[in-house]
Amino acid sequence: MIGSDIQHAMELLQQEQVVAIPTETVYGLAGNAFSPLAVSTIYAVKGRPAFDPLIVHTSRFERAAAFTTRIPDMAYRLAERFMPGPLTLLLPRSEAIPDIVTAGLPRVAIRVPGHPVAHDLLERLDFPLAAPSANPFGYISPTTAQHVESQLGDKVPYILDGGPCQVGVESTIVGFGDGQAVVYRKGGLAVEEIEAVVGAVSVRAHSSSNPQAPGMLKSHYAPRVPLVLGELRALHEQYRGKAVGVVAFRQALPGIPLQQQLILSPSGGLAEAARNLFAGMRYLDGLPLDVIIAELLPEEGLGRAINDRLRRAAAR
Ligand code: TXA
Ligand code: MG
C-alpha cells in the first residue's frame, strides 16, 4: 500500500517490519539496522545475495558516531559540507552494527538522506535504518513510490510516498585509505565537488565478482530489453527493421517514434538528465521493443554517474 503516513511507517519499523521510504536519490527498502530480523527480511524481499552489504541511514551525522570506531578528518569535512545529501561514507564499524548489515565487512556505510520525509522519519526513530535501493536485485532503481509498488508491492507492507526523487541516481560512496579519499561508486554527488573539499581522490568504482562495494557488479540496472551503447545513428542503421527504443542526451533521433525515445535533458543539464534516467529506462523497458540504443553523456559531473549506470545496464 502507498501512503504518506509517517506514523504508520514508524510503527511498522518499530515492529521489525520493512517499509519502502523516499530519499532524494532513489527509494529505499528500509528496516531497523539494529535488528537482524528486519535486515534479513530486506535481503529476502529484494532477493539480494547475503554478501552484498546495506547502507545505514541516520538523520544527523553526529548520530553516526555510535556506529563507527574512528572518523577521519576528511570524513568530517565531507560530512559537514555534503550531509544531508547524496553521499555515503565508509567508516570502520563499531559493535553496534550487526554483521548481517555489513555482510561481515570491516566498514559500515553511513548516509544522511536530504529528503524531508526521510529526515523526519529518521529523526523520530531511536534506531538507524538499513536500506538498499527498493528494486529487485539487479534491476533499475525506483525513483517513485509507484515504481516500488509495481515490483515489490505484494512483499512490502507499506510504501511511504515522498514524490519523485530529485537527484535520481544513488549516492556517491566514499571511503578513506592512505590519506586519500576513494570513490567506490559514482553517484549523485559529483566527484569534482568532493575533490574541491578533500583534494584529489582515487576512483575505484570498478566491477568484479568480489568488489569492495559489491553493488558495483558489472551487470546492474539492467532492463529486460537489451540495451546497447554507441553512436545513435550508426546503431539505428545496424538495427534497421527492429523495434528500437532510444536513450539520448539532448536530441531525438529522426526516424523513430518520439514515444520510443527518452530525451534526458533537451537543455543539456546533467542534473536533469540524472533525474529522468531511471524512470525513463523503466518506461522504455515496458514497451514492446527489440533493443534500446543509448548514447553516453559528457564524462563530467553527474554525467559520470549516468554513464556508469548506462554501461552497467548494457553489460550482460
Ligand atoms: O542513494 C543510495 O545510496 C540509496 C538510498 C536508498 O540511500 N541506497 C542504495 O543502496 O543505493 P544499495 O544497497 O542499492 O547500494 C549500496 C552500495 C552497494 O554497492 C553495497 O555493496 C555498498 O553500497 N555497501 C554498503 N555497505 C558497504 C560496506 N560496509 N562496505 C562496502 N560497501 C558497502
Ligand atoms: Mg541498489
Image (cartoon, rainbow, N blue to C red):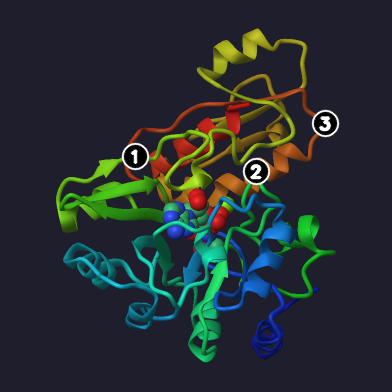
User: On the image, numbered disc 2 is attached to which residue?
Assistant: 138
User: On the image, numbered disc 3 is attached to which residue?
Assistant: 288
Viewer-closest of 122 and 248? 122
Q: Which of the labelled discs sits on residue 204, or is there none?
A: 1
Upstream in the sequence, badge 2 or badge 1? 2
Labels 3 and 2 touching (C-beta < 8 A) = no
What amino acid is labelled 3 in the image? Pro
Upstream in the sequence, badge 1 or badge 3? 1
x then y, percent, for residue 67: 39, 75
Q: Which quadrant of the structure image shows residue 64?
A: bottom left
The residue depicted at 39 percent of the width and 53 percent of the height is 172
**Mark 2 falls on what kind of element?**
loop
Quadrant of the snapshot with the C terminus: top right
The residue depicted at 22 percent of the width and 70 percent of the height is 76
What amino acid is labelled 2 in the image? Gly
Instruction: Using the rendered image of the protein, determine whether residue 216 is visible from the camera's viewpoint.
Output: yes
What amino acid is labelled 1 in the image? Arg
Query: Which of the two discs, 3 and 2, sits closer to the camera?
Result: 2
Q: Which of the labelled discs sits on residue 123, or is there none?
A: none
**Cα gap from disc 3 to disc 2, whole angstroms:** 21 Å
Viewer-closest of 280 and 227? 227
Residue found at the very far right of the displayed protein: 154
Q: In the figure, 36 relative to 164: above or below?
A: below
x then y, percent, for residue 170: 49, 54
Query: Which of the two discs, 1 and 3, sits closer to the camera?
Result: 1
Quadrant of the snapshot with the N terminus: bottom right
The residue depicted at 71 percent of the width and 84 percent of the height is 12
Q: In the figure, 92 relative to 205: above or below?
A: below
Upstream in the sequence, badge 3 or badge 2? 2
In the picture provided, is 155 more to the left or to the right than 188?
right
